[in-house]
Image: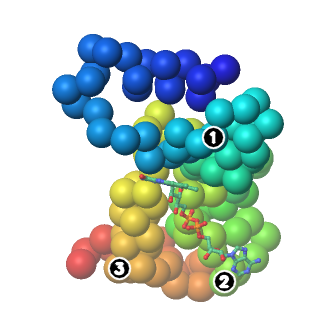
Amino acid sequence: MALKTARTIGHHAALDEWRDVEVLPGSPVRSDADLDAFIASAASTHHHPAGTCRMGGDADAVVDPDLRLNGFDNVFIVDASVMPTIPSGPINAAIVAIAETWASAPPTHDRENRNGIERNSG
Ligand SMILES: Cc1cc2nc3c(=O)[nH]c(=O)nc-3n(C[C@H](O)[C@H](O)[C@H](O)COP(=O)(O)OP(=O)(O)OC[C@H]3O[C@@H](n4cnc5c(N)ncnc54)[C@H](O)[C@@H]3O)c2cc1C
């Protein structure tokens, strides 16, 4: 239905001036079966998975504010899974910022002596 609607809009006379040929799925693809087959081959997920190992200071958090996996001394998670809440927009830039911030000053594995370490000092 959505593909048919998009096609109807795309072929409307009001767009004649702007339209050339239909590239995808292409004019030979007409029947419901062929349209379904096109959708099955062309559709992909556009997921932005985040927050499955959220950072926090509470007992339910998976990683601490240094991104250390709770219960481990020297295991860290540095990706979108540590985001404490699900962002409302594309997340790649935020992930790069998380990774670069962490990599610029990786926490010491020595929990006792890491307090007072100047993070993000460049
Ligand atoms: C189709 C699509 C389009 C997107 N477009 C945009 C966009 O335009 N703008 C934007 O901001 N974001 C976009 N995103 C989202 C963004 O790309 C992802 O959210 C981001 O790359 C996730 O980064 P990450 O480091 O958390 O995870 P990933 O990039 O998925 O990295 C995880 C890595 O861990 C590896 N791995 C997994 N399991 C294991 C294991 N057990 N052991 C070792 N390695 C493992 C994987 O192979 C992978 O290399 C898009 C996502 C998709 C799917």
Classify residue 93 by image quadrant.
bottom left
Residue 82, percent across and down? 60, 56
Between marks 2 and 1 in the image, the one whose residue lies nearer the viewer: 1
Instruction: Quote the CA–CA distance across marks 2 and 1.
Output: 55 Å
Q: Residues within 10 Å of mark 1 (few under 14, many from 20)?
A: some
Label 1 residue SS = loop
Label 3 residue SS = helix
Residue 6, percent across and down? 50, 24
Q: Residues within 10 Å of mark 3 (few under 14, many from 20)?
A: few
Q: Could you tell me which residue is drawn at 56 percent across and 69 percent down?
A: 78
Give whichever of discs 3 and 1 has the lower sequence position: 1
According to the picture, the residue beneath numbered tag 3 turns out to be 104
Circle 2: residue type: Asn
Circle 1: residue type: Val
According to the picture, the residue beneath numbered tag 1 turns out to be 29
Between marks 3 and 1 in the image, the one whose residue lies nearer the viewer: 1
Q: Could you tell me which residue is drawn at 70 percent across and 69 percent down?
A: 69
According to the picture, the residue beneath numbered tag 2 turns out to be 74
Ligand 1 shows up in the quarter that is bottom right
Instruction: Quote the CA–CA distance across marks 3 and 1.
Output: 52 Å
Give whichever of discs 2 and 1 has the lower sequence position: 1
Give whichever of discs 3 and 2 has the lower sequence position: 2
User: In this view of the protein, which residue sits in the foreground, 13 or 50?
Assistant: 13
Q: Where is 79 relative to 43, above or below?
A: below
Q: Could you tell me which residue is drawn at 66 percent across and 20 percent down?
A: 1
